[in-house]
């Protein structure tokens, strides 16, 4: 019985399947590590299993329950098992388009909408569907954009931002980059309200940025998954200012609290032609096939504009605004530079005022900062380096979601933008912020 490759006339010694894989891994420069957001969630869980109390500011999951009418619809359709159209059911796409026309004032049409198992997969599918392009990504930006660009075979370019510019790409910066690097296909990814910053563009700045993108023929991917959670209900979609060149993604994970349902939506404007949508449908048909039948039925309920839905959204906005403002102001008062968030549930604090004191403690990078905070203060944050910032930039993402929002939905939101952090429903958030401040000043 043959026991080596040479027994089949192949020169050389026997090579196992594992050996071939190991050789391939060593030569594969496109390998992608696990997402930092998922890793911090697992690290926090393991510490809790050891008996530690961890304030979980690392993982960005909505603290509010899924919209109740959508849950009821999901239960009603639990037995549905048919494969549905690749693009998504016509009924759901109609609801999605109507929702965004109403909420955003943009021209979404059902025939240009694609439904997928989460907007994350849509972002990757879009980058894979594009011809060879530069993918322009702000730093900081959500952790998965750059790895997805690499997996899709595209060239990712980081555009560094600053605290003074609200961690946003400026019109002047985009114009300068395009002029200095010459004409080519480019996709600029914008996320507002942003992850990890919680910030949105001021309307005039956004209009100027749109004008620059139009002038240079830059396609924009607007990741607006947090749009309905703009704290004042004033989200301005990028497609309002650049409709012919903006693809927009959203979904149920944040504003509907349904991250685990995995339902995302994408709008492809007419002006970008049919070929791109055809390519996206081809990728969908060969990968995810269709979103689960019960989830599509439930999503059609979630995307139906009703008084109950508007109360659900507004209650979330007001609580998130009050809690986020308190956290930002408390950190600012302690010397940690922090912008008050515009939407969502993130802050992006800058600890540079403590640089020398932290250096004395052996902390010179954002990773060392967050690792030590987790170990010594029991507070989980994500380092700024996970979002594309320089390792020595002492920034971190803080997701102020370590509370159960179910009780808050049953209560009147705070009358002002301040709230009492001793409230039992949100006490853990206040404790987490105070733990950070105490730790910073402990030595």
Image: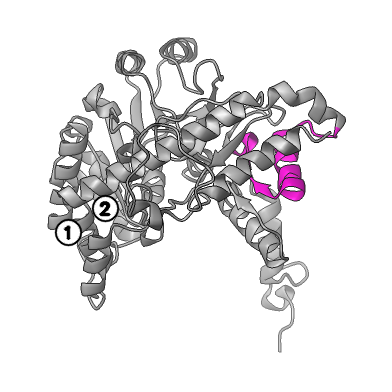
> Which element type, helix, strand or loop, lies under badge 1?
loop
Q: In the image, residue 291 lies at what x, y percent?
A: 29, 62
Q: Residue at x 19, y 58 (%)?
A: 301
Instruction: Write down the residue under mark 2.
Output: 115
Query: How far apart are the alpha carbons under marks 2 and 1?
Result: 8 Å
> Is residue 114 in the magenta section?
no
Q: Is residue 365 magenta?
A: yes
Tags 2 and 1 touching, CB below 8 Å: yes
Q: Could you tell me which quadrant the C terminus lies in?
A: top right
Is residue 77 in view from this perspective?
A: no
| In-front residue for pair 380/120 | 380
The residue shown at (41%, 60%) is: 260
Name the disc covering residue 89, or none. Answer: 1
Q: Position of residue 320 (x, y in %)?
A: 41, 40
Colour scheme shown: one colour
Q: Determine whether 413 is above or below 173 in the image.
A: below
At x 29%, y 17%, the residue is 214
* Range drawn in magenta: 361-386
Mark drawn on residue 38: none
């Amino acid at each position: 019985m043959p026991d080596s490759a040479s027994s089949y006339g192949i020169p050389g010694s026997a090579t196992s399947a594992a050996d071939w894989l190991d050789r391939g891994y060593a030569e594969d420069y496109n390998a992608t590590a696990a997402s930092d957001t998922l890793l911090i969630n697992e690290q926090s869980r393991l510490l809790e299993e050891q008996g530690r109390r961890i304030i979980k500011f690392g993982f960005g999951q909505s603290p509010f329950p899924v919209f109740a009418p959508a849950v009821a619809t999901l239960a009603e359709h639990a037995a549905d098992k048919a494969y549905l159209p690749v693009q998504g059911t016509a009924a759901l796409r109609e609801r999605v388009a109507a929702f965004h026309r109403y909420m955003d004032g943009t021209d979404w049409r059902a025939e240009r909408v694609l439904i997928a198992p989460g907007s994350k997969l849509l972002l990757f599918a879009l980058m894979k569907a594009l011809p060879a392009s530069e993918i322009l990504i702000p730093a900081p930006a959500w952790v998965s954009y750059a790895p997805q660009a690499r997996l899709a075979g595209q060239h990712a370019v980081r555009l560094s931002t600053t605290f003074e510019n609200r961690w946003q790409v400026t019109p002047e910066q985009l114009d300068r980059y395009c002029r200095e690097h010459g004409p080519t296909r480019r996709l600029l990814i914008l996320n507002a309200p942003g992850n990890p910053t919680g910030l949105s563009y001021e309307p005039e700045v956004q209009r100027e940025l749109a004008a620059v993108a139009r002038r240079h023929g830059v396609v924009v991917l607007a990741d607006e998954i947090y749009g309905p959670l703009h704290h004042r209900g004033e989200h301005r979609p990028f497609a309002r200012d650049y409709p012919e060149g903006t693809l927009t993604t959203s979904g149920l994970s944040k504003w509907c609290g349904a991250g685990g349902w995995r339902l995302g939506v994408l709008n492809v404007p007419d002006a970008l032609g049919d070929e791109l949508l055809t390519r996206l449908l081809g990728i969908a048909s060969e990968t995810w096939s269709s979103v689960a039948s019960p989830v599509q039925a439930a999503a059609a309920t979630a995307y139906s504009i009703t008084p109950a839905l508007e109360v659900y959204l507004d209650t979330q906005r007001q609580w998130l605004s009050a809690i986020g403002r308190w956290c930002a102001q408390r950190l600012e008062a302690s010397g940690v530079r922090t912008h008050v968030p515009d939407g969502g549930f993130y802050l992006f604090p800058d600890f540079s005022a403590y640089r020398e004191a932290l250096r004395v403690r052996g902390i010179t990078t954002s990773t060392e900062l967050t690792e030590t905070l987790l170990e010594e203060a029991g507070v989980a944050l994500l380092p700024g380096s996970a979002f594309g910032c320089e390792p020595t930039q002492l920034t971190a993402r803080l997701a102020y979601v370590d509370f159960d929002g179910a009780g808050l939905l049953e209560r009147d939101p705070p009358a002002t933008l301040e709230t009492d952090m001793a409230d039992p429903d949100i006490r853990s958030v206040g404790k987490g912020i105070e733990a950070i401040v105490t730790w910073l000043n402990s030595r």
